[in-house]
Amino acid sequence: MPANENRSLDRILRTVRGHIRTYNLPRPDRLVISTRSRSVHAEFASGTAVDRFAAVLLWTATLHGTEFGLTYGARDEIRLAATGRTGAGIGIGLACSGSVFELGGTVEEHDGFNGWTHRFATLPGLPTLAEARTDLASFDELATLVASARSVTPVAAEVAA
């Protein structure tokens, strides 16, 4: 690796670490740094689904030009991807996932015209999500989802016990 890329990597790493400390952000489980694009990809994989989604929201609240995409996928999983830029111009990509049910949602199946069964996920504060499709979401919609899931999760845990 050339010396320029080492300096670039050090600069990006210092900037990201400073950003985490300045805003007291949760530490991601995985961090991938690209020196060519001056970007970072952070993934949250541990803790509850609600905690992972909240961590992504906390990060995005400190970024500029954020965009959110939600995908309802196999095994009734919701994947959240978010992008934005730090004040220093570093692109940040954030990702996490969680079960529809952990997030206080429900799943419905509908028979289609072609004989296939189509699955849809309904989550608090969000429009219905079709399986295998990515939909845009807003910060406010996701904040409503996290708040609602936090209030539902303790009740679900009590019922399961």
Image (cartoon, rainbow, N blue to C red):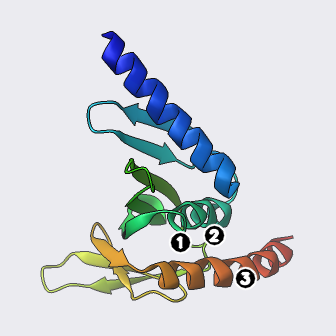
Mark 3 or mark 2, which has the lower sequence index?
A: 2
Residue for point 53% across, 42% down: 16
Q: Write down the quadrant of residue 127 in the picture.
A: bottom left
| Residue 63 located left or right of residue 148 | left
| Residue 116 located left or right of residue 63 | left
In the rendered image, residue 157, in percent from the top left (x then y), is placed at: 80, 72
Q: Secondary structure at mark 2?
A: loop
Residue for point 29% across, 78% down: 118
Mark 3 or mark 1, which has the lower sequence index?
A: 1
Q: Quadrant of the N terminus?
A: top left
Kindly report the distance in space between the C-alpha atoms of the residues bearing marks 3 and 2: 9 Å
Q: Amino acid at mark 3?
A: Val
Q: Using the image, determine if residue 31 lies above or below residue 106.
A: above
Q: Which mark is residue 102?
A: 2
Q: Using the image, determine if residue 26 lies above or below residue 103.
A: above
Relative depth, front residue between 151 and 33: 33
In the rendered image, residue 95, in percent from the top left (x then y), is placed at: 46, 54
Relative depth, front residue between 59 and 105: 59
Q: Quadrant of the C terminus?
A: bottom right
Q: Amino acid at mark 2?
A: Glu
Q: Secondary structure at mark 3?
A: helix
Q: Are marks 2 and 1 in contact (CB under 8 Å)?
A: yes
Q: Are marks 3 and 2 in contact (CB under 8 Å)?
A: no
Relative depth, front residue between 51 and 73: 51
Q: Which residue is mark 1?
A: 100
In the rendered image, residue 55, in percent from the top left (x then y), is placed at: 61, 60
Kindly report the distance in space between the C-alpha atoms of the residues bearing marks 3 and 1: 12 Å
Q: Which mark is residue 152?
A: 3
Q: Does any portion of residue 29 appear in the rendered image?
A: no
Residue for point 32% across, 86% down: 110
Q: Which mark is residue 39?
A: none
Relative depth, front residue between 32 and 108: 32
